[in-house]
Amino acid sequence: MSSAATPAANGTTFVKPDTSAWKLSDLEMKETLGTGSFGRVRLCKHKNGTDYYAIKCLKKREIIKMKQVQHIIAEKNILAEISHPFTVNMLCAFQDDKKLYLVLEFVIGGEMFTHLRSAGRFPNDVAKFYHAELVLAFEYLHSKDIIYRDLKPENLLLDAKGHVKITDFGFAKKVPERTFTLCGTPEYLAPEVIQSKGHGKAVDWWTMGILLYEFIAGYPPFYDDTPFRIYEKILEGKVKFPNWFDSRARDLVKGLLMTDHTKRLGTLKNGVADIKGHPYFHGANWEKLFNRHYPAPIPVKVKSAGDTSNFEKYPESGEDRSAPLTPAQQAEFKDF
């Protein structure tokens, strides 16, 4: 991978190092930042450098068991294709006998979820700032026919200067027209996903409506004890707003939460321009937003470049004693 300037997670533009020859033994493993069904994400540092990275370590055996080989390869291919100020960017990917590795930017500020929970809800100007950064991220992803499909506060990280970064592209998919897979988080699912009618880029604008509501209200608009009852409420499409909810934000949320996806903001003939031109974003300078010209409203406290205090603590994993994969199983990962 050649050196190229991409927006760094520490809020500056950094020159991507030449990672073409990187292998696991070059990296010094540090604390665990998160865990998932196939493995964990750890902080790491190149032995010859000072920069920190996040490395996603995925167990091949688990991926095969869950029939997710193509899914993981698709995620890696999408990460290899994207580079944007408001997405977590990948530096390289490699594998060994037992695991796959994705080396990503280390986004030091932790999850948006943590900041939202500690604040209870965001003031209108804070919600507007982050929603605007995400509009630019989705405009970019959709220009590449990528739908993300898993927007929620847990999948948003904050960089050292408090700007947003979308992480976890596990549900993202290259979809020029539409797809039929059911995936996502119940409170955020669009009606057309629940009804299995086939869905496309409009689902991301629906989730943007849910997120803006949650930012301002402190809870999602469709909520209940079971997924089934949540789905009923989503399909009914009645949104109740607290009386203090900003009127322009309310209008934007209603436009994004149109149950008929053909009438939803972001999918009409002007596309994303309808959202960027909405009165809620009156006066926004989108170019300055893209260049992270404005100071972010949530302060991120960090002591050093490898500080993990904004992440939960996880117990370390034991040694992997699983049997080696057969040659046929290894061959499943030849495209990674």
Image: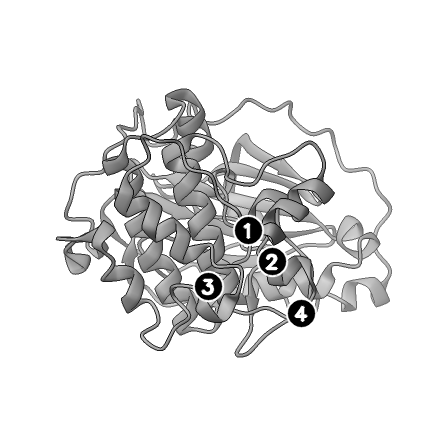
Q: Position of residue 43 (x, y in %)?
A: 49, 36
Q: Where's the C terminus, which quadrant?
A: bottom right
Mark 2 vs mark 1, foreground winner is 1
Mark 4 highlights which residue? 197
Q: Earlier in the sequence, mark 3 or mark 4?
A: 3
Which label belongs to residue 191?
A: 2
Which label belongs to residue 237?
A: 1
Are circles 2 and 1 on residues that touch, CB within 8 Å? yes
Q: Position of residue 325 (x, y in %)?
A: 83, 55
Mark 3 vs mark 4, foreground winner is 4
Disc 4 residue crowd, few under 14, some 14–19, many 20+, Cα 10 Å: few
Mark 4 vs mark 1, foreground winner is 1
From the viewer's perspective, is 101 left or right of 84? right
Viewer-closest of 144 and 248: 248
From the viewer's perspective, is 263 left or right of 76? left
Disc 2 residue crowd, few under 14, some 14–19, many 20+, Cα 10 Å: many
Q: Position of residue 74 (x, y in %)?
A: 61, 66
SS at circle 2: helix
Amino acid type indicated by mark 3: Ser
Asked if one can make out residue 161 in the rendered structure from this viewpoint, the answer is: no
Which label belongs to residue 20?
A: 3
The answer for how far apart the CA atoms under marks 3 and 4 are is 42 Å
